[in-house]
Image (cartoon, helix red, strand yellow):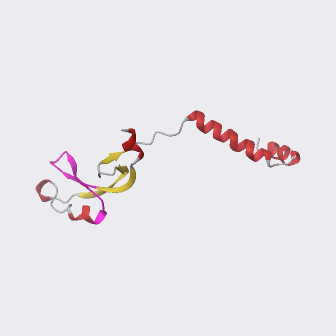
Amino acid sequence: MSNTISKLQKIRAFSVNSADNERQSSNKGIYNSFETASKYTKNAGWYGSNGEVVQLPNIYADEEGTLYTVKEIGDFTDVKEVKEKELLESIQSKLTPEELEFAKKVLK
């Protein structure tokens, strides 16, 4: 599984959604281009209604073309804190003592 994940490529994917009845709609297919998806919207829905094309967010494909959706959940809190501390230390190391004192006063 981890081998597959490392080989995922982010792609653009488009879904055709249309009505199944008066209360429900569903996905009728996933396509790799807006133009292709648009062709499948005609008469795709209930009583011959047209569907709509929606670009799907965060879609990835593996080498075989299997699609995956990935949900971003953020960053590691501890890693972010360490990076911010290192960045601040790097900035401070480039300032003279006078500049550092001035920056501390201004940035309160």
Q: Is residue 77 left or right of residue 100?
A: left
Image-based side of 9 in relation to 36, left or right: right
Measuring from the top left, give residue 21's x and y in whole percent: 15, 48
Q: Return the residue nearer the eye: 3 or 53.
A: 3
Toward the front, the furthest residue is 3
**Total residue callouts:** 0
- What residue is at 64 percent from the left and 41 percent from the top? 83
The relative height of residue 103 versus residue 39 in the rendered view (above or below) is above
Residue at 15% x, 60% y is 43
Q: Which of the pair 43/9 is nearer the observer?
A: 9
When the figure is inspected, residue 76 is found, relative to residue 92, above or below; the finding is: above
Extent of the magenta region: 15-35
- Asked if residue 6 lies left or right of residue 90, the reply is left
> Is residue 95 covered in magenta?
no
Q: Quadrant of the N terminus?
A: top left
Which of the image's four quarters has the C terminus? top right
Q: Furthest residue to the left?
A: 47
Q: Position of residue 42 (x, y in %)?
A: 18, 63
For the question of whether residue 84 can be seen, the reply is yes
Return the x and y of residue 45 as percentages of the image width and height: 16, 55
- Residue at left offset 21%, top offset 65%: 39
Q: Position of residue 32 (x, y in %)?
A: 30, 59
In the image shown, does 62 or 97 lie closer to the viewer? Answer: 62
Q: State left or right for residue 9 relative to residue 66.
A: right
| Residue 70 at least partly seen | no
Magenta-drawn stretch contains 33: yes
Residue shown at 76% from the left, 44% from the top: 107
